[in-house]
Amino acid sequence: MKLKHLLQTLEITEQHGTVDREIKALSLHSGQTGPDALFVAIRGTRSDGHAYLEDAYRNGTRVFITEESFIKPDAVNVVVPDTRQALAALAAEFYRHPSRELRLIGITGTNGKTTTAFILESILRRAGLQVGLISTIAYRFSTRYRPADRTTPDALGLQQTLREMADNGINCVVMEVSSHGLDQHRVAGCHFDAAVYTNLTPEHLDYHKTMENYFQSKKRLFTDVLPSSKKKKTAAVVNMDDERGSELSRQTPCRTLEFGFDRGDIHARDIDMSLDGITATLVTPAGDIHIQSPLIGTFNLYNIMGAVAAALFLEIPVPAIREGIAATRSVPGRMERIDNTKNKIIFVDYAHTGDAVKNVLQTLKAAGAENIIIIFGCGGDRDREKRPVMGGIAASYCGTVILTTDNPRSEDPMQIIHEIEVGVLAQGFTKAASVADMRNRQNMYCVCSDRKAAIQAGIQMAQADDVVLIAGKGHETYQETGTEKHHFDDREEARQALQLCA
C-alpha cells in the first residue's frame, strides 16, 4: 500500500522525507522491521518505542511514525500528536477496514465480559452465523484457536485478526473490550454494530488511579467508538442495575437496549436458581423467552440478559437464543465445576476483585452452599488496596479460608498474603498454625504459600455438602513469579488433588 495513501488518515505535525514509497508491513517492534516496513514508536507502560528507533533504522526500516523528530537523510519521519491513535488509523486502513465487512459486537465492564461473550457466541452459532471470538481466554474462529495474551489485542494485531476472520468467511465477531484497550485507542477504527455494558466495580486502579478515570475509559466505547461506526444501525446494551448504567444510557447518542433484574427492555421473572443452573422467563420486546442454563448465579443471569439483548438487536430468532443459552454449559475458569466421583463440589473461578469474589460467594450461598472453603491470593504489582477488602469478603461468607499465592510477579508473596490477612482478621477469624491444625474449621484460616499444596489441602478437608472455591486465576495456565512464567492450572491441580482423596 502506498505510504502517501496511508498518511491521509493521520493528523500530522511534522513530515520529513519523500512519501512516494510502498509499505508492505506495519510494525511496533524494532526487531520485526525491514526495508518495506513502517515502524510506529509507541510509548508503553514499560518501554518506549522511541528508544528503539536506531535499532529499527539499522534493520533497514526507512519510514517512522513518531511523537518526536527522528530525521535521517534517507528516511521518512512523520511526527504525530499520539502514535497510539495513529497506529489505530494506519492499521485499519492497511487491512482495509475489516470490521466494515463484519457484524461486530463489543462487550465491556469489570465483570462478566467473558461469560457474556461466550453466551452470545453460542447464540449466534445456533443462528447459523460464522462467528469469531476475541476474548480474555482466546482468539478463535472456524478451527483456529490462539490463547489470548491480553483481553483486547493492540490495534495492529486486532485489525490483522479481524482481516483474517473476514477473509475466512467469518461474518460476525464477538469481542471483549477492556478499559486498557479503550484508553490506549486499540479499538479506534473498529466499526461496531452493538456494544454491551455489564457493570463497573473497583479494578485496574493501579493503572487508572481513580474510579472516575476507569469509568471514563469504559464510557468511550459508547460515547466515542460506537457513535463513530459506519454501520447503518447501532445499539448500546446497558445494565441498568449497575449504578453507572443510567448515566451511560443518558450519555450515549446511540439507540439503547436496557436490561435489569426486574426492569428494562429485557428483565426476568419466574426465576429459579440452584447449583444445577438457572431457569427463568425473560420479558423482551420479542415476547417472553423461557430459558434454561447450566450456569449458576444471579450474575450469570445478568450475563445472559446482556447477551440476549444484543442478539435481539441483531434480529436473531428466539429458538436460537434459547438453544445458545442452554448449550453454554461452562466458560473456562468462570464458575467452572470440576466434575468428580468423590462427591466433592469444587469450582474454579477467575474472581480476583472484591466485588467479583462477593458475587461468587453470594451465588454459592443462595444456591444452598452451607459451608464454603475458599482458596485464593492476590496478584503482585497490581492494586494493593483490594487485598484486605478481598480478605474481609472471603471471611464474611466462608467458614474456612486458605490464603495462598496468585501471580506474585515482582512482589514478595508473603507480603501480599499478610496484606490480605488484615481483612480476614478484622472478621474475627482465628489463624491456624498450619493446614493440619484446621480440624475445627469454622471461622479459621491458614496460610499456605504453595498454591498446589493449598489446593490439595482444601479439597482433602472438604466434607459432604462443603463447597470448595478456588479463586483468582480461573482459565490461566501459568503462574508469574518474578519475570518468569511457569505452567500452573488450577483445574489440573484440582483434578490431581481429587486423585489423592480416599
Image (cartoon, rainbow, N blue to C red):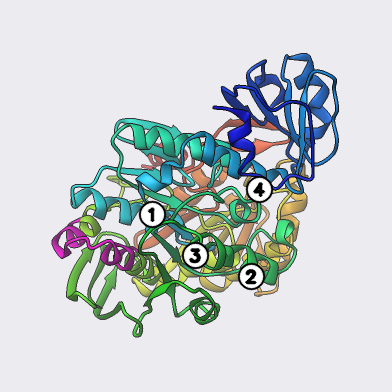
**Residue behind mark 4:** 85
- Mark 2 vs mark 4: in front: 4
* Mark 1 burial class by Cα count in 10 Å: few <14, some 14-19, many 20+: many
> Which residue in the protein does label 1 denote?
117
CA–CA distance between discs 4 and 3?
A: 17 Å
Check the image and name the residue furthest to the left.
Answer: 319
Q: Which of 130 and 497 is in front in this view?
A: 130
**Quadrant of the image occupied by residue 113:** bottom left
Helix, strand or loop for disc 4: helix
The first of marks 2 and 3 along the sequence is: 3
Q: How many marks?
A: 4
Give the labeled residue for mark 2.
Answer: 392
Residue 346 inside the magenta-drawn segment? no
Question: Does the magenta segment cover residue 314?
Answer: yes
Residue at numbered disc 3: 227
- Secondary element at image label 2: helix
Q: Distance between the residues labelled 3 and 1?
A: 21 Å
